[in-house]
Amino acid sequence: MATSPDHPRLLQTVLDTPDPRRLAFQLAPDMPAPRWPEGSPPQMLHLDLTVGSVADLERQRSRAVALGAEVLLDRTADEDEPLYVLRDPAGHPFCVFVAPEPSDAEPA
């Protein structure tokens, strides 16, 4: 991640995609962490990240935990949509779930 030259309070990262996209995060160190699923303050943003297999899901959970995330919900036994709900070190919840790549025949 790098600070945006135009907006020094924003962090940016380039996503690993064929046509690079940017994702920016505003720095707000004094903002209290949201509480999930209930509480004050409420969550303001929730990222859903997808992986292609249960093995990838486990790798990404391990990676997130190694980076400081905490597992809030383990729903890996769900055959239809295995997922984890995690919380980043600042308290923001996010999901990682299995969603196979769509085929070229399916509309985007």
Image (spheres, rainbow, N blue to C red):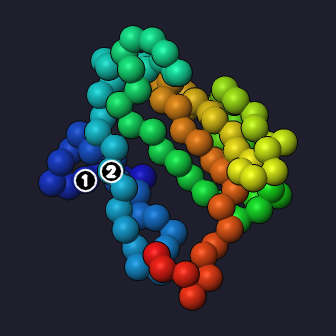
Which residue: 40% across, 73% down? 20
Three-letter code, disc 2:
Ala
Local packing at callout 1 (Cα closer than 10 Å; few below 14, some 14-19, many 20+) is: some
Q: Secondary structure at mark 2?
A: strand
- On the image, the x and y values in percent for residue 39 come to 45, 12
Name the residue carrying label 1. Answer: 4
Q: Is residue 2 above or below residue 101?
A: above
- On the image, the x and y values in percent for residue 22 come to 35, 62
Three-letter code, disc 1:
Ser
Asked if disc 2 and disc 1 are in contact, CB closer than 8 Å, the reply is yes
What residue occupies the far top of the structure in this picture? 40
- On the image, the x and y values in percent for residue 19 come to 41, 79
**Comparing labels 2 and 1, the label whose residue is closer to the camera:** 2
Residue 24 got which mark?
A: 2
| Residue 19 visible in the snapshot | yes
Which residue: 84% across, 42% down? 77
On the rendered structure, is 29 left or right of 83? Answer: left
